[in-house]
Amino acid sequence: MLFGDTELPLQASSGTMMTLLFLVFSMAIPFFLYNQAMRHLPIGMASLLLVLIIPFGFLFAAIILGEEITLIKAIGAILVMTGVAFPHFPKVRRKFI
């Protein structure tokens, strides 16, 4: 390989190629859109949105992959979403600060 032919044989089925394309687009497009949104959001809101990855990952794993939704997972997702929403309610925030 060091001194021989530099061409690597690529023998992949159409299913493998479709999987690779799906993985590239499922990672690249959301990453691009997230970065575009960061340009237009205040830094506080942007950091809060990052926390929502966990409950949305849980939700889409249940919908797409058929992952089991347990009570502990649901409570965790609700707690995360409540924690993200909490700073956006000024009256509630003033009571605790």
Image (tube, grey):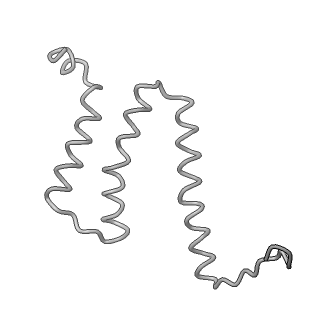
- Lateral position of residue 43 relative to residue 5, left or right: left
Q: In which quarter of the image is the C terminus?
A: top left
Instruction: Name the residue: 54% across, 29% down.
Output: 40
Q: Quadrant of the N terminus?
A: bottom right
Please determine whether, in this image, residue 56 is positioned above or below residue 66.
above
Residue 85 % position (x, y): 27, 33
Asked whether 17 or 1 is in front, the reply is 1
- Lateral position of residue 56 relative to residue 35, left or right: left
For residue 72, which quarter of the picture?
A: bottom left
- Lateral position of residue 80 relative to residue 12, left or right: left
Instruction: Name the residue: 58% across, 53% down.
Output: 29
Instruction: Name the residue: 13% across, 58% down.
Output: 71
Instruction: Name the residue: 23% across, 68% down.
Output: 68
Residue 18 % position (x, y): 60, 75
- Lateral position of residue 3 relative to residue 77, left or right: right
Residue 90 % position (x, y): 25, 19
